[in-house]
Amino acid sequence: MPRPAATAHPLRALRQILGVSQRALAHMVGLSSHTVLSVENGRLAMSERFARRIEALTGAKAHGLLDRSGGGKLLNQRGKRYTRADYEEWLSRVASPLHGSPDQLAANVHAQLTGLFRDAEAQGTLALVYHRIIEAVAEGQVRVRQ
């Protein structure tokens, strides 16, 4: 008797909507491409933290990504089916604080970092956040100007 076709994990559908490879998605969320592959193939359950990272980066609701039954539906912030247009809208809203005068940009970055550090401290991961920032600067991923 033939096996029923495996239902693709919503992460795969999201990745296809975004038009990115497993490796690119892994880089976006700070995980290995093996982790993305394992979640997509059902060998690894998606963690809530991973799903929340995806939601923060794309606007796709985390609960659809966490559905382990394989029937998870990708939904946007309004509860409708997630599309490429939702991603582009999300990007425009998320990226908008990065435009403006140098003073506006500095104020926006300061506000974002303050929130990040507050959350990291509450989760007990503040040292890890500092370490990752220093690592990114050392590797040239972030340039610091005097």
Image (cartoon, grey):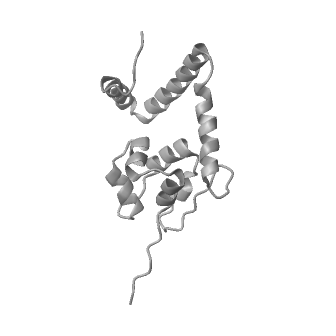
Q: Furthest residue to the top?
A: 146
Q: Give the quarter of the figure containing the C terminus.
A: top left
Observer-nearest of 139 and 43: 139
Please say if 69 is above or below 1: above
Observer-nearest of 5 and 18: 18
Give the residue drawn at x 57%, y 50%. Answer: 60
Query: Residue 86 appears at what percent x and percent y?
Result: 63, 48
* Numbered disc total: 0
Q: Furthest residue to the bottom?
A: 1
Give the residue drawn at x 44%, y 77%. Answer: 5
Query: Residue 10 appears at what percent x and percent y?
Result: 50, 60
Give the residue drawn at x 36%, y 57%. Answer: 37
Please say if 85 is above or below 115: below
Q: Give the quarter of the figure containing the N terminus.
A: bottom left
Q: Quadrant of residue 41?
A: bottom left
Observer-nearest of 142 and 118: 142
Is 119 situated left or right of 92 in this image? left
Please say if 26 is above or below 146: below
Please say if 27 is above or below 17: above
Is 118 situated left or right of 139 in this image? right
Query: Residue 12 appears at what percent x and percent y?
Result: 47, 59
Is 99 situated left or right of 9 in this image? right
Is 76 situated left or right of 19 in this image? right
